[in-house]
Image (cartoon, grey):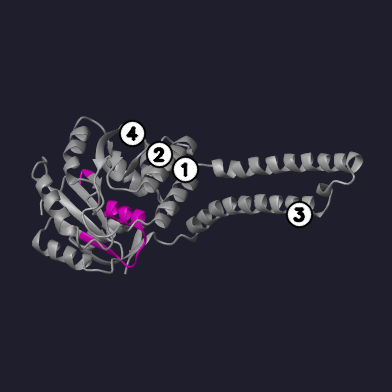
Amino acid sequence: MVSPKYSLVVPVYNEEKNILELYRRVSAVGEQLDGAIELIFVNDGSRDRTLQIVRDLHQNDPRVSYLSLARNFGHQIAVTAGLNFARGEVAIVMDADLQDPPELIVEMVSKWQNGFQVVYAQRTQRQKESWFKRGTAYIFYRLLQHLADVDIPTDTGDFCLIDRQVLDILNAMPERNRYMRGLRAWIGFRQTSVQFDRPPRFAGKVNYTFGKSLALALNGLVSFSKVPLRLSTYVGLFAAAIAVLMALLVLYWRLFVPQSPLTGFTMILVAIFFLGAVQLVSIGILGEYVGRIYEEVKGRPIYTLAEVGGFSSHADFKQKLGSRGEES
């Protein structure tokens, strides 16, 4: 196989209805580029025929390689695994549901050829998505941009082009709670965007449920902002101020309105519940950060691999793997 110039990394989870159409469109885009491509599928513990379809593509097209994770590790880890194995001068991350249009790659490559080292796709519209999903996404991205320690562009996902210099730095970063679009922004270098209208999913059901989206949002917020920790301090100070005010009110009622029912059991109960809620929220916020410290210090590999196809040799495979994962 000719050494690839462009590595396309595609995490897949139960995408049997989309893979062949994605392959067709990516192949058409590859003919417009000025170098060879490799297409790296990362099977994230799929339960349908996804892995078998990827194997068949690999058998028929040497440009197709694949990694099969030993279980479902999650989208961000699957992206990390694919980037660890990318061999091109450029890595392009995209989803398999075709909501990331492969045709946009040509414009991304043009930006890269003009000197930009990171080119991310920025969504201008979300077609056929509920008002709830559009609204929560709008609020989250702007809240994250306001609270994060780095400038994370709004309305961007993982669909992006990354230059080899940036990719090597990204692959060397050891953290396990990965929020790729935040890490991408943190690294720096020359970055720009290409805008597009996000089309609906080509086929199949949405794998990114509200719960998974919420977990990703919390991970991004905790990974790139210390504001939640400060917030617990501010809430504690606010609670202390309220407690002092309540004490003054109770003293006033005792002296000047002795018959007031607010000086009795009800006031005490409200105060206990209020302070208890503040304490539990603060402990919960602290727990999110402590939990991430716990994950980091355990030192486990980020992922394990059950099957690998399309890489030149076992030695090359071990070199690419390094400390990022383990062979099963």
Contact flag, marks 1 and 3 (Cβ < 8 Å): no
Disc 1 from disc 2: Cα separation:
9 Å
Amino acid on which the number 2 mark rests in the picture? Trp
Contact flag, marks 1 and 2 (Cβ < 8 Å): yes
Residue neighbourhood size for the residue with mark 3, other residues' Cα within 10 Å, grouped as few (<14), some (14–19), many (≥20) = few
SS at mark 3 in the image: helix
Q: Position of residue 317 (x, y in %)?
A: 25, 60
Contact flag, marks 3 and 4 (Cβ < 8 Å): no
Disc 4 from disc 2: Cα separation:
9 Å
Q: What is the span of residues highlighted in magenta in the rendered image?
A: 66-90
Q: Position of residue 195 (x, y in %)?
A: 26, 35
Residue at the far front in the pictured view: 259
Question: What residue would you read off at disc 2?
Answer: 186
Residue neighbourhood size for the residue with mark 1, other residues' Cα within 10 Å, grouped as few (<14), some (14–19), many (≥20) = many
Q: Position of residue 206 (x, y in %)?
A: 30, 57
Residue 189 marker = 4
Contact flag, marks 2 and 3 (Cβ < 8 Å): no
Amino acid on which the number 4 mark rests in the picture? Phe
What residue is drawn where x is 10% and y is 59%? 61
Amino acid on which the number 1 mark rests in the picture? Phe
Question: What residue would you read off at disc 3?
Answer: 269
**77 displayed left or right of 42:** right
Give the mark nearest the N terminus, 4 or 1. 4
Q: Nearer the viewer, mark 2 or mark 3?
A: 3
SS at mark 1 in the image: helix
**297 displayed left or right of 165:** right
Give the mark nearest the N terminus, 2 or 3. 2
What residue is drawn where x is 19% and y is 37%? 109
Residue 224 marker = 1
SS at mark 2 in the image: helix
Residue 147 marker = none
Give the mark nearest the N terminus, 1 or 2. 2
